[in-house]
Image (spheres, helix red, strand yellow):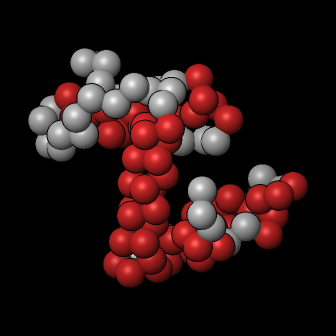
Amino acid sequence: MNGTVKKSSEQWGWGVCGFVSVLSALQDNKVIDLGHYIPDSREHRDLIISLVKDFLRQLQNDKPCIAKEIETFTQTFGGDFATQTLQGFLQHDH
C-alpha cells in the first residue's frame, strides 16, 4: 500500500476498515485516485463517509435486496444499531 489511504486508528471506532482497505487496493492498482489524505484528518473522515454514502445510495438503486441485507445485518449488532436504517444513515449529517 502506498500510504495515501490507509486504515487509521479512528476507523476502529466507526467500522469502515474493510471499506478503506478496498479503497486502498483500488488506489494502489490505479483504478481510482483519491489524492493524498492524512488518515486521521477531518478531510479524510469526510471523504470516507461520503464514499460510503455514495456506495449505499448506488446499492439501494441498483441492488435493493443487497442494501436491505446490509441494513438487516447491521441491526443484528444491537444497541444503537438495532433500529438503524440505511435511509436514516444516509440522511444523518455526520
Q: Is residue 79 above or below residue 40?
A: below
Q: Is residue 3 above or below residue 83?
A: above
Q: Is residue 92 above or below residue 81?
A: below
Residue 73: % across, % down: 67, 60
Asked whether, in this view, residue 87 is left or right of residue 36, the answer is right
Residue 27 placement: quadrant: top left
**Residue at coordinates 39% horizontally, 62% vertically from top-left?**
55
**Residue at coordinates 74% horizontally, 63% vertically from top-left?**
75
**Residue at coordinates 29% horizontally, 25% vertically from top-left?**
4
Q: Is residue 13 above or below residue 2?
A: below
Task: Tell me the quarter of the image containing the N terminus.
Answer: top left
**Residue at coordinates 48% horizontally, 52% vertically from top-left?**
49
Asked whether, in this view, residue 15 is left or right of residue 31, the answer is right
Residue 69 placement: quadrant: bottom right
Residue located farthest toward the right when viewing the structure as drawn: 79
Residue 18: % across, % down: 48, 38
Residue 32: % across, % down: 18, 43
Q: Nearer the viewer, residue 13 or 65?
A: 13
Q: Nearer the viewer, residue 54 or 47?
A: 47
Residue 15 placement: quadrant: top right
Residue located farthest toward the front when viewing the structure as drawn: 42
Residue located farthest toward the left when viewing the structure as drawn: 30
Residue located farthest toward the top when viewing the structure as drawn: 2
Residue 74 visible in the picture? yes
